[in-house]
Image (cartoon, rainbow, N blue to C red):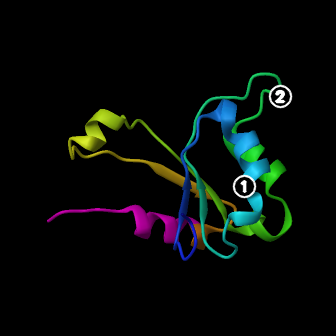
Amino acid sequence: AVQGAEIVLLAIPTQFLRAFLETNRSTLPVGVPLVVCAKGIEVGSLQSPFQIARDELPGKYSKFMAVISGPSFAKEIAENQPTMLTCAAEDPELSNIVQRKLSCIKA
């Protein structure tokens, strides 16, 4: 599903993120933004989703990792209502790339 992708959104509930990454890390593309979209903390480790992703995707993936967060709700997005999110990454240019790929501003 991610072969040839320009961006990968990791929209997986926090409690299942670690297992998903352990199982699927070899199938994730290298060199494209990997964007963590989950929120909350993992029971047991008390790690955020971004911390989990950094633990499970070291090395070749680390410089392509970003996280988005904000007051958005699936219902409003599905209804095409406007929402705003924040994107953060260690590399500011990666944040800009993610922003451009996810923006949908209508005039």
Occupied quadrant, residue 46? top right
Q: Residues within 10 Å of mark 2 (few under 14, many from 20)?
A: few
Q: Is residue 63 left or right of residue 92?
A: right
- Would residue 106 be counted in the magenta stretch? yes
- SS type, badge 2: loop
Residue 53 picture location, percent across and down: 74, 49
Spatial CA distance of label 2 from label 1 is 21 Å
Q: Which residues are magenta?
A: 95-107
Query: Which residue is identified by label 1?
Result: 24
Name the amino acid type tagged 1.
Asn
Residue 81 picture location, percent across and down: 21, 43
Image quadrant containing the C terminus: bottom left
Instruction: Tell which tag, 2 or 1, sits nearer the viewer.
Output: 1
Image quadrant containing the N terminus: bottom right
Query: Disc number at residue 73?
Result: none
Q: Is residue 93 above or below residue 56?
A: below
Q: Residues within 10 Å of mark 1 (few under 14, many from 20)?
A: few
Query: Disc number at residue 45?
Result: 2
For the point 21% across and 41% down, the residue is: 79
Residue 25 picture location, percent across and down: 75, 58
Q: Earlier in the sequence, mark 2 or mark 1?
A: 1
Majority SS type along the magenta span: helix
